[in-house]
Every structure is written in structure tokens, then in C-alpha cells.
Image (cartoon, helix red, strand yellow):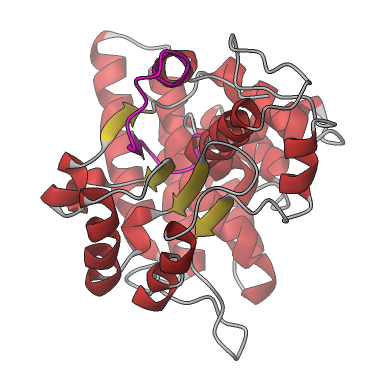
Amino acid sequence: MLIGHTGSAAQFRAAVAGGRVHHAWLLAGPPGVGKATFAAAAAAWVLARASGHDDPVDDATLDIDPEHPTARLIAAGSHMDLRRLERTFDPTGKLRSGIRIDEVRALQPLFRSTPGLGDWRVVIVDAIDDMNRAAANALLKNLEEPPPQTLFLCVSHSPGRLLPTIRSRCRTLRFQLLSDDEVERALRRALPEATASEREALVAVASGSPGRALRFADAGTDKLLGELTALASATPAEATGRALALAKSLAGKAAAARYEAFLDLAPAYIAQAAKTRAGPRLARALALWERATQLGGSAAGLSLDPQSVSFELAGLVAGLAAA
């Protein structure tokens, strides 16, 4: 079941059900908000509708019964009318940096035949941003001269970086950040064993993106949130000791995941605190957030010392007590 994005889903369903479906759709929006999930649900719904099977497909949602023959074939990875273009692994087991032209060319024999199980075939590109120039140009030829009864669902985190000719051949569906309630619902589904406090901490670090939150699911984010809450109300003398202890706990290779989570969580915590303030207190909180965001965003790229960065970020959070 898709969470959020009801407007985008309604636009897509109306186009397909009304026989006005465009051959290529650009699913554009921030990372981790559910664009790939939408693409998978939309593909299954289209293929189930086109299969002619007796099991009904609900045109009010993109949901299909998991026991529907189409859903079972997709789950088994054996639906002949569904293809995915995505980054693959090289012979050493390392994920390649982009989608290659060879993968686009491998689709061409498929396009010379008719769909095997219904009236449509679907190609999911996840993400089209990952294509190198040669691969993008090869896909563009298919978008300019679309194979009959073929639907392209192209996930994009940065549509402005795509070739203008690719964007012009697609109908764009916009995806926005989810509300905290929607993120919490997504986390309940993805992490059924998580406690309420763990989900609360992950919602705080998500900033509207369930995918972002799931990156930190095993990083003890709830304990980090507790440390930040204590820092935000500590006296200056208490804050220094707490900040130093926290910084030491985030140093070293064993703490790499927690440190990465902390780089995101500290600015997010300050941003949440700023929402409850007004006037000069809001201005001071926003100044703290700006400094924390800049430091957290540049620390990894500049290979800054994790303990020093953590201590400084903790000090910025502690600044909320005076702000």
C-alpha cells in the first residue's frame, strides 16, 4: 500500500483508466520519499489491468491483491512484461557508479516483440539520474520513438540534471516530502519490531523522507535523540561534559553508522526546536541550525575529525538552552 502522494497516484490512475496514458513518466522528487515504491505499484497495477485476468483491479487505488497472478509473477521476478533498468554489480561485487549503455541496448530485442501476458509492458528506470551520457542518449531514442504499448516509469531525484530532451519526452509527476505522520506510518510497516521511541527518533532524522530514516535504523538513533534532548536543556558546565562524552562515543570505525546518523540528526533536532520559537529566540535557533547544517553537510566530504565535529555539533545543540 502506497503511503502519501495521493495526488500523483490519482493523476496516473486517471490517465491510464481514461486511455490517455503518456508513454513516459518522470517521477521527480527528493530521495527516499517513495518514488521507486510508486513506480513498482504503478507497474503492477497497469500490468494487472492489462492481463485480462478475472480478478478485479481497483481503479480507486494502485493496490492489487498479493495473490493476483500478476503480483505473484512480479514477486517471483518472472513477469516477462516488466523490466528494470538500475545499477548493476561488477565482477568484484561492487555496485557500478551508473547505468550503462549495454543495459539499455539489452532491452531492444524485447521492444521488437509484442507484450507476452497482456496489452502493456513496463520499464522502470531507477534512477534515470544514474545513467551516463551514452546510456541516456540510448534511452532517449526509445522515448522519441516509443515501442508500441510500452510504458516507461523513470525515477529522478534531480530532474534538472537530466537532458532537456529527456524531460520534454516525459510527463512529470511531482513527489513531495511526507508529513511526520506519514513517515511514522511508513516506519511502522518497514520496522514492525521498532519501539515507539525508536520510531520517534527516526521520524526526527527523516525530514520527510522514510528512506533517509531507514538508513539510520540500526544506528541507535533513539539514544542519540535522548543525548541531544539532555544537551538542549543542560547548564553550560553540564553541557561541556556531555558534549565531550558524546563526541568520544562517536569516534572510531565501530561508531561510523552512529556518527553518520548524528551528522543528520543534530541539525534536524535544532530545526525541530526552532519551530517552537518566535522572535529573537527563533533567530538565534536558526543561526545555530545554519551552522550545524553547514558543518554536518561538509564533515564527510572534507574528512574532518569525527570527534571534533561531534563535539562542535553537540555544543551547537547545547546552545539551544541559551537561545
User: Where's residue 106, x and y in %?
Assistant: 46, 72
Q: Is residue 114 visible?
A: yes
Quarter occupied by residue 42: top right
Whether 28 is among the magenta residues is yes
Q: Position of residue 19 (x, y in %)?
A: 40, 19
User: Quarter of the image containing the C terminus?
Assistant: top left
Residue 24 colored in magenta in the image: yes
**For the point 44% across and 49% down, which residue is it?**
313
Q: Which residue is most to the left?
A: 164
Q: Is residue 202 above or below residue 183?
A: below
Q: Is residue 80 left or right of residue 193?
A: left
- Residue 314 seen in this snapshot: no
Locate residue 103: give its quadrant.
bottom left
Q: Residue at x 59, y 90 (%)?
A: 91
Which of the two residues, 1 or 67, is positioned nearer the viewer here? 67
Q: Residue at x 35, y 55 (%)?
A: 128
Q: Residue furthest bottom?
A: 92
Q: Of residues 300 and 286, which is closer to you in this image?
A: 300
Marker count (numbered): 0
* 311 on left or right of 148: right
Q: Where the N terminus falls, by quadrant?
A: top right
Please state the extent of the stretch shown in magenta in the rendering: 13-33
The x and y percentages for residue 112 are 42, 61
